[in-house]
Amino acid sequence: MKIKDLKKLGEFGLIREIQQRVGTAAHLVKGIGDDCAIQFQREGWELLTSTDLLVEGVHFNRQWISMEELGRKSAAVNISDIAAMGGQPKSLFLAVACPIEIPVTELEQFITGFLAVAEEHGAILAGGDTCRSLGPLLISVTVQGEVETGCAICRDGAKVGDAIYVSGTLGDSAVALTDFLAGRNPEEALLQRHNRPEAKVVLGRQLANGKLASAMLDVSDGLLSDLGHILEESGVGAEVELSSLPLSEPFRRRLQEAPELIDLALTGGEDYELLLTSPHQGLSEMAFEGGKLTKVGAICRQPGLNIRQADGSLYRCSRGGFDHFS
Ligand code: ADP
Ligand code: MG
């Protein structure tokens, strides 16, 4: 790209740049370039749609994440919502409100990261909107995916006696953010979890195809908060075993220095792991292509969410999950 100044490149110059970098997809009759994208809808499949906002200063700080990683993350956290339903992502729509002083090269890096993650999941950028921002960089991503009719895994299906599972490890992203906020540089493994989250599409598809989960969502606001959504929608309660939470090696090391960090595994956001309930009690022992599951508790009749310590006593968490307005 020869023009480095967004003002010179202009809105349509930028859109053309983006358009030139996007390929084709079988389901896309028409992508970027018209008033609407046109998509072919397969018989026997349902359409899933979700939107996410990423606002500079609220969701990210440009000093802590590269534009390429921000592009990756913008696509990944959105695709994660399709994974959380057991769906296959198909099309992405990217709306950007951009401060005029951001160099075009940085926007190109953003697009590079965004398109790389889309491609990793077999999804295509099918449209969007572009304008100037007089304030922060603002990114809105809409994703559409599909799932076999009747196979989407919703939040309202948890039943008494179901086991509760979570994929991967919890709290790593939140420790990295805590470090940044304290003026420290997080160690690489934790930083990766924060800046390069991965959508668990393959695992979500396996769970949907195998009809293995009764309820599911992705952990974006913390385990307790997100499990709370399942409990509320399903009209049940839960018991979670504190000692069974899946924790990474770097997280465990930090925990030795500061035991109170355990609350970040319970309430820290942006893990983008899958949290699910299932009548099957042995999923932790199953080998899934898309990642490992850990059993962390069980669904019970009595409403509310209890966290049990190894000695059987109840644990009181000092923090709540993430809420934008409180
Ligand atoms: P409209 O006037 O209908 O909003 P635009 O001129 O904004 O159309 O957009 C022209 C085409 O470029 C549309 O197909 C739109 O979806 C696409 N587009 C605009 N901005 C983006 C973007 N940031 N990423 C991907 N596609 C975009
Ligand atoms: Mg427009």
Image (cartoon, grey):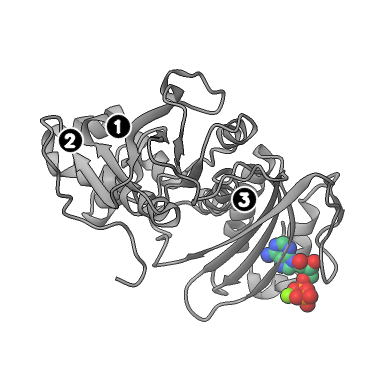
Where is residue 280 shown, x and y percent of the image? 47, 27
Disc 3 from disc 2: Cα separation: 33 Å
Residue denoted by label 2: 255
- Of badges 1 and 3, the one in the foreground is 1
- Residue 174 drawn above or below residue 60: above
Q: Tag 1: Cα neighbours inside 10 Å, few (<14), some, or many (≥20)?
A: some
Residue 27's spot in the image, x, y percent? 84, 48
According to the picture, the residue beneath numbered tag 3 turns out to be 114
| Amino acid, disc 3 | Phe
Q: Amino acid at mark 1?
A: Leu
Residue 228 position (above or below residue 26) = below
Q: Nearer the viewer, mark 3 or mark 2?
A: 2
172 or 134, which lies in front? 172
**200 with respect to 185 (left or right):** right
Which residue does the numbered mark 1 point to in the structure image?
A: 247
Name the side, left or right, on which 177 lies relative to 22. left
Q: Are marks 2 and 1 in contact (CB under 8 Å)?
A: yes
- Of helix, strand and loop, which one carries label 3? helix
For marks 3 and 2 on the same chain, the one whose residue lies earlier in the sequence: 3
Residue located farthest toward the right when viewing the structure as drawn? 29
Residue 3 visible, this angle:
no
Asked if the residue at label 2 sits under 8 Å from ligand 1, the reply is no
Callout 2 amino acid:
Leu
Sort mark 3 into few (<14), some (14-19) or many (20+) by Cα contacts within 10 Å.
many
Image position, residue 93 (x, y; %): 69, 60
Q: Kindly tell me whether residue 239 is visible in this rendering.
A: yes
Q: Is residue 39 left or right of residue 147?
A: right
Whichever of callouts 2 and 1 sits on the residue coming sooner in the sequence is 1
Q: Earlier in the sequence, mark 1 or mark 3?
A: 3
Q: Report the residue that reaches farthest toward the bottom.
A: 134
The quadrant the N terminus occupies is bottom right
The residue located at (82%, 68%) in the rendering is 36
